[in-house]
């Protein structure tokens, strides 16, 4: 088990991307959910370079920004960190005007707890002037301080030969503990599962009361925590707005609107279906994933013991855990990566598909310690469909060894991610 540190002591593997962006881009936005480490990262990079820090969580600064956005931006030092920019969207136009007068790289580091890409009028105002960096909660490899080479192994179909020397530990019940911990620095720094769960409950309350108000006018705020908990119960499953709307006296369009808000503040996300023009029997429904499994466990009221006993829920949350870990790896990858899932009407499926250029790889996830040829059914179907574009297929399982299961097919221990 990793020894936990304060959030300021974790090295974020996306930091080099931030430093590179500041060398050639006037505005860099670090966005992600609250408490994932955006401010810590911005200050770690910006303070030694002389950046002036302003938080729009400070009500005086917020009111000044809203009252006179042009004057507020004009008064800023040339190098400025503006924290929680979504609280004053009026500033985007003024920042654009300021940057157009002075295109010096690295002038502004912005942080935001809402996805401006879902607010096109804001994103478009800084098109060509702003780079966006998505920061997620801590990856397990950031907690342990060991940068992974998983994508190189995956797209190179090179996981090494199996030997006792390369055996990984079987995780067993500790897998449930890892899932319940999640990746928020303030949560995992707490000494007990009970205290972590309390942090997550307070976090949800704060998010609903503050951040939602910044991005949408929601009349039924009390619905959002219950809707988020329902979404947590459906994580890693096909998105079904009817199922999500049925417990509430609200229309499906309203529920969809509320889900969009939860997506906008980085609490849920959709995994789109993979498709190919020559295939007609694919299911075209996205999957829904919570963005942090610690948050999901708190919403569902489960701890590591109860999660370990509920194998169905364990499987769902493990799939979400792996999906999120891979998304974090992709955020700092040197190659652009796209994520999908695959399922056809014969119920043949692959949990995660990753595209890199013209190459494609598939990943299946299971919590069991054994793996069989049957676990590769979906991956073999994908391999047949894609031919030479198929880089590799991996079944992640709670075993000890990397095992070959055919050409470019491997069973790989989940411990690789912990």
Image (spheres, grey):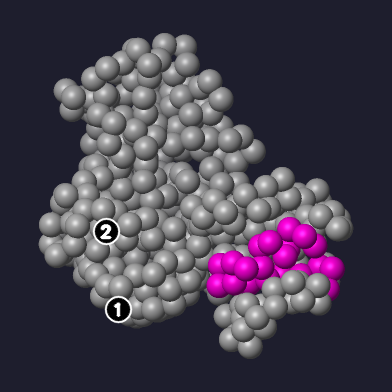
Q: Is residue 340 visible?
A: yes
Residue 174 spot, x, y in % from top left? 31, 59
Q: Is residue 102 above or below residue 58?
A: above
Relative to residue 365, is residue 331 drawn left or right?
right
Q: Is residue 305 left or right of residue 161?
A: left
Q: Quadrant of residue 197?
A: bottom left
Q: Quadrant of the N terminus?
A: bottom left
Point out the tag, 2 or 1, that comes first from the N-terminus.
1
Assign a secondary structure to mark 2.
helix
Whether 26 is drawn above or below 238: the answer is below
The x, y position of residue 70, in whole percent, is 74, 72
Give percent across and percent down for residue 128: 72, 45
Q: Can residue 395 be seen? A: no
111 versus 323 height, above or below:
below
Q: Is residue 120 magenta?
A: no
Q: Which residues make up the magenta segment? A: 77-98
For the residue pair 186 and 402, the one nearer the viewer reads as 186
Choose top left, top right, bottom left or bottom right for residue 209: bottom left
Q: Residues within 10 Å of mark 1 (few under 14, many from 20)?
A: few
Residue 254's disc is 2
Instruction: Indicate which disc residue 194 carries.
Output: 1
In the displayed structure, does residue 324 sit left or right of residue 175?
right
Q: Nearer the viewer, residue 61 or 53?
A: 61
Residue 384 location (% of width, % of height): 34, 12
């Amino acid at each position: 088990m990793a020894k936990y540190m304060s959030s300021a002591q974790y090295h974020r593997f996306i930091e080099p991307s931030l430093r590179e962006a500041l060398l050639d881009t006037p505005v860099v936005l670090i966005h992600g959910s609250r408490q994932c480490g955006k401010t810590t990262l911005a200050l770690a990079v910006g303070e030694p370079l002389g950046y002036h820090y302003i938080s729009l969580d400070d009500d005086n600064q917020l009111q000044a920004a809203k009252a006179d956005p042009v004057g507020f931006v004009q008064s800023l030092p040339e190098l400025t960190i503006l924290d929680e920019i979504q609280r004053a969207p009026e500033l985007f136009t003024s920042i654009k005007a300021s940057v157009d007068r002075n295109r010096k790289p690295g002038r502004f580091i912005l942080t935001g707890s809402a996805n401006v890409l879902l607010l096109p009028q804001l994103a478009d105002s800084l098109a060509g002037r702003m780079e966006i960096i998505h920061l997620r909660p801590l990856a397990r490899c950031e907690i342990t301080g060991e940068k992974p080479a998983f994508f190189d192994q995956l797209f190179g179909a090179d996981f090494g030969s199996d030997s006792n020397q390369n055996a990984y530990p079987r995780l067993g019940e500790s897998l449930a503990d890892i899932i319940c911990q999640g990746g928020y620095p303030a949560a995992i720094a707490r000494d007990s599962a009970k205290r972590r769960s309390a942090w997550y409950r307070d976090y949800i309350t704060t998010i609903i009361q503050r951040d939602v108000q910044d991005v949408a006018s929601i009349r039924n705020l009390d619905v959002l925590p219950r809707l988020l908990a329902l979404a947590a119960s459906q994580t890693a499953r096909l998105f079904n707005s009817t199922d999500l709307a049925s417990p509430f006296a609200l229309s499906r369009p309203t529920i969809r609107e509320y889900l969009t808000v939860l997506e906008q503040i980085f609490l849920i996300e959709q995994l789109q279906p993979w498709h190919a023009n020559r295939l007609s029997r694919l299911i075209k429904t996205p999957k829904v994933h919570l963005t942090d499994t610690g948050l999901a466990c708190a919403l569902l009221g489960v701890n590591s013991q109860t999660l370990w006993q509920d194998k169905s829920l364990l499987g769902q949350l493990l799939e979400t855990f792996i999906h999120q870990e891979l998304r974090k790896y992709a955020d700092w990858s040197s190659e652009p990566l796209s994520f999908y899932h695959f399922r056809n009407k014969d119920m043949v499926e692959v949990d995660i598909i990753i595209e890199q250029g013209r190459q494609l790889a598939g990943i299946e996830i299971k919590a069991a310690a054994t793996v069989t040829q049957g676990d590769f059914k979906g991956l073999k179907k994908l391999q047949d469909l894609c031919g030479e574009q198929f880089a590799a297929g991996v079944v992640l399982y709670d075993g000890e060894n990397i095992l070959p299961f055919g050409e470019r097919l491997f069973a790989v221990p989940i411990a690789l991610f912990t």
